[in-house]
Image (cartoon, rainbow, N blue to C red):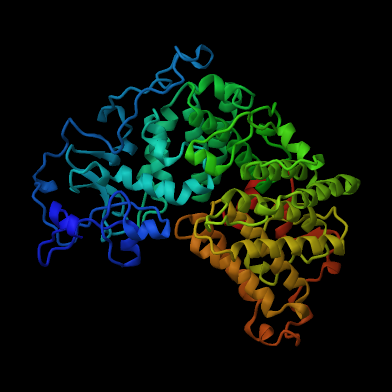
Amino acid sequence: MADLEASGKGKRQAGKPSLLACWECRRKHVKCDASQPICSRCTKNSLNCTYVPSRRGYQGSVPRRRNRIPGSPAAQLLISPGPSTDLSPSASPSLAPQSPDIRISGAITPTSIPASSRAFVEIPGTRPVFRPNATPSQQSFSSSFAGTNPSFQDDEYLLGLFYSHFYPTHPFLVPQNCYKTQSYPVYLRLVVQLAGSQFAPRKSNDDLVDAVDAQLAAASGSSVYLVQSLLLFAIVLHARLDMAKAFIVLARACEMAINLGMNRYGFAAEYGNNDAVKEESYRRTWWELYVVDGYFAGLHRQTSFKCNLVELSASLPCSEHLYVKGMLRTPFVSLHQFDQRLFSNESVDFGSACYRIAAIRILARAIAIAGSGHGVQDEVQAVDNALRAWRLHLPAEKTEFFNDLDIVDHMMLQAHSFIDYTYILIHFPRSELALNLPSISDLACVPRADRVYSASSQDAIKSITACKDLSNLASLPVVKHSPLFICCLVFGCVVQLSACSSQPYSCTLQHRERVAVMTGLLKQMSQFWPLAGDVLHHLNRIAGVVFRDDSVADSYTPHTTPSEVIDMTSIPDTMAWLDQLFAGGDSSMAAASELIFGH
């Protein structure tokens, strides 16, 4: 404190609030010592320290917004356009279609920005900020005065939110300390801001969605940066309940990445400009695209996905801590080398992202046979063996989700959730669980389809075990979750609710609390992702019928009459609304969307 006072930075005027308090300290309503770049509390608790200026009680010496000239021709985008991308014609002739999108000019004028994007145009000397007291229709990032320090710009704030909340679960862009050195184009920086804005308190970012949409629609040609932008946008759109558009955007990203050759060995080294971090980002981008493409295909009952139909020779991602520190080691691991771990006597340290990719590869095998009826038992058993082998061959350190510093291993957490989801996808439709829930009459159901599976108690046990595992994942003290985890939680709840509906006499308080944990996490995630709130509404309605208060009070006394539950034996040739999630065909996405997501 003495040093601060000597420098004049620690003095405060009596009665005047401090302009400097990091976001984490404000959120917890605790004092912040305003140390920069990281305050003492954030340093102690390993938190992401982001400074945003407080406007309460501060008049400032800079003229107010109303004194500025509206519509100034010097208006500029919210973000600062980055310099030219590296995939330029001179750097890569094969990746250089004659398109202005390959090189992004640093000059962007208001007239070049679509009308839907102009909500993010500001006057020099001002910055777009969120107005917390505005009406819902007014709650957007709009322009008003906020000081002159560049670290207080909204793009810095949203960038901090992105790297603090979203990036740990999808780390395919460069680490935060390398972000500003990258020549990321405008559209990619906008998508990063959009993902970060999902975690801004009490906000509406619809204008930013429109701005991103317009920028990406106008982008022509092909580049890794455009692939990264489309991939990130697809993840956000899906979690915002715009699933049809998410599939279109993702399909564009997949096609572009394959045409560029991102799936092939040597691509990253050839176009990474001898930048090891950038090369790793390129490899991670391809495999993230593979994971998301496969996961979306599984959710909406496609029998294959585009990224799994091409050569997969790109090197696998390295360990997260090496990537963040820039300590990349060579040679890099291939998919074949990773597969050989199953029969190797040597212990090799593979990155957690490798196990996440392996989980999706098993999912790819599962969706190819999930909609099949009789005659595929050998294939089902093969997938089941692969799922079991995946777990049995995990190194001891990969069975835990926290390292010695209590840092979450998000890649392994997601990998386990994908494995559990695949178990449910394979075994639940073939189980003896009742697929009709007591509240079925309250749901807008699609027509029933013919049942093609034979009931099996073993399949039911494996489905319920996977449900328990998902509940255990939801109970971990983890604050940040990927939006991809939302649908895994939905399937976990559905299995547990179906089990209790078919076996009401054995449904206990433990089962109810298992569902409560998963719906509780969905409730928490609904603060950021509309998808979580939407599915939670439907699940709560069903759970409210299944878990009647009087029937759970005494777990050994049946209070639900047989007439309230539709037994599986009464409908041997049919299946209810839930089976539509496991039915293939062109209408599978629409059916799943209508039944689970209410659209």
Instruction: Specify whether 432 is left or right of 179.
Output: right
Residue 339 against residue 132 in the figure, above or below: above
User: Image quarter for residue 201?
Assistant: bottom left
User: Image quarter for residue 306?
Assistant: top right
Residue drawn at x 45%, y 39% as measured from the top left: 175
Residue drawn at x 66%, y 61% as measured from the top left: 470
Instruction: Specify whether 39 is left or right of 445.
Output: left
Question: Which is nearer the eye, 454 or 181?
Answer: 181
Residue 257 against residue 241 in the figure, above or below: above
Residue 358 against residue 93 in the figure, above or below: below
Q: Is there any visible trace of residue 587 in the rendered image? A: no
Question: Where is residue 73 shown, x and y percent of the image?
Answer: 17, 30
Question: Where is residue 68 shown, x and y percent of the image?
Answer: 11, 42
The N terminus lies in which quarter of the figure?
bottom left
Q: Is there any visible trace of residue 321 in the rendered image? A: yes
Question: Where is residue 566 shown, x and y percent of the image?
Answer: 78, 71
- In this rendering, the count of numbered labels is 0
Question: Where is residue 331 shown, x and y percent of the image?
Answer: 63, 28
Residue drawn at x 70%, y 26% as measured from the top left: 311
Question: Which is nearer the eye, 380 or 73?
Answer: 380
Residue drawn at x 59%, y 69% as measured from the top left: 517
Instruction: Specify whether 17 is left or right of 384.
Output: left
